[in-house]
Image: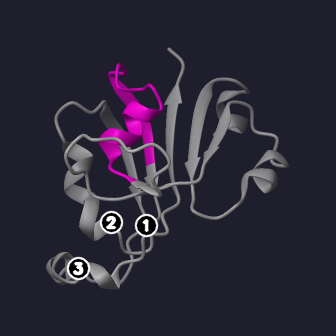
């Protein structure tokens, strides 16, 4: 995205449970921020500092982006968690997600209801990205 729009145009937040911060710095992307936490369903808004998983609303708040009107691109590849959290993408009180890019795992939309019933089968290792363009 930075190649297309120019350096400093977007702010990138990259989330992954793995330790990829140094590797990411080698990519030389300006305004990129790496966070070692994942995404889970949004519960009661009760942010516990240092947690491994946060809901989307809590994540936006932790980043100080709860005053934004828009998140331009929300990209998620979370190894089946998409079935558990997709409803949270449209919660009231979130900035509008203008573009949602999702990597779907299992390939069968009918498995959505099964995933909700069998959360233990869904990996919490969740890389995802929030990009906001400067206005």
Mark 3, residues whose alpha carbon is within 10 Å: few (<14), some, or many (≥20)?
A: some
Work out whether 135 lies above or below 120.
above
Identity of the residue furthest to the top in this view? 135
Q: How far, Cα to Cα, is label 3 from label 2?
A: 9 Å
Q: How far, Cα to Cα, is label 1 from label 3?
A: 15 Å
- Label 3, on which residue? 115
Q: Which residues are magenta?
A: 54-74
Secondary structure of residue under mark 2: helix
Q: Image point 27% across, 69% down: which residue? A: 83
- Label 1, on which residue? 103
Q: Are marks 2 and 1 in contact (CB under 8 Å)?
A: yes
Earlier in the chain: of badge 1 and badge 3, it is: 1
Q: Are marks 3 and 2 in contact (CB under 8 Å)?
A: no
Q: How far, Cα to Cα, is label 2 from label 1?
A: 8 Å
Secondary structure of residue under mark 3: helix
Q: Image point 26% across, 78% down: which residue? A: 119
Q: Are marks 1 and 3 in contact (CB under 8 Å)?
A: no
Earlier in the chain: of badge 2 and badge 1, it is: 2
Instruction: Provide residue 88's location: percent of width, then percent of height.
Output: 23, 50
Identity of the residue furthest to the right in this view? 26
Tally of numbered discs: 3
């Amino acid at each position: 995205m930075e190649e297309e729009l120019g350096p400093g145009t977007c702010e990138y937040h990259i989330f992954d449970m793995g330790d990829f911060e140094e590797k990411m710095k080698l990519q030389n992307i300006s305004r990129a921020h790496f966070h070692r936490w994942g995404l889970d369903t949004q519960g009661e808004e009760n942010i516990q500092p240092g947690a491994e998983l946060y809901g989307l609303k809590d994540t936006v708040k932790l980043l100080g982006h709860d005053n934004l009107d828009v998140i331009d691109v929300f990209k998620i590849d979370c190894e089946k968690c998409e079935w558990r959290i997709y409803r949270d993408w449209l919660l009231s009180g979130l900035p509008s997600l203008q573009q949602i890019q999702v990597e779907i795992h299992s390939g069968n939309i009918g498995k959505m209801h099964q995933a909700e019933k069998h959360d233990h089968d869904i990996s919490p290792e969740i890389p995802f990205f929030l990009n906001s363009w400067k206005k």
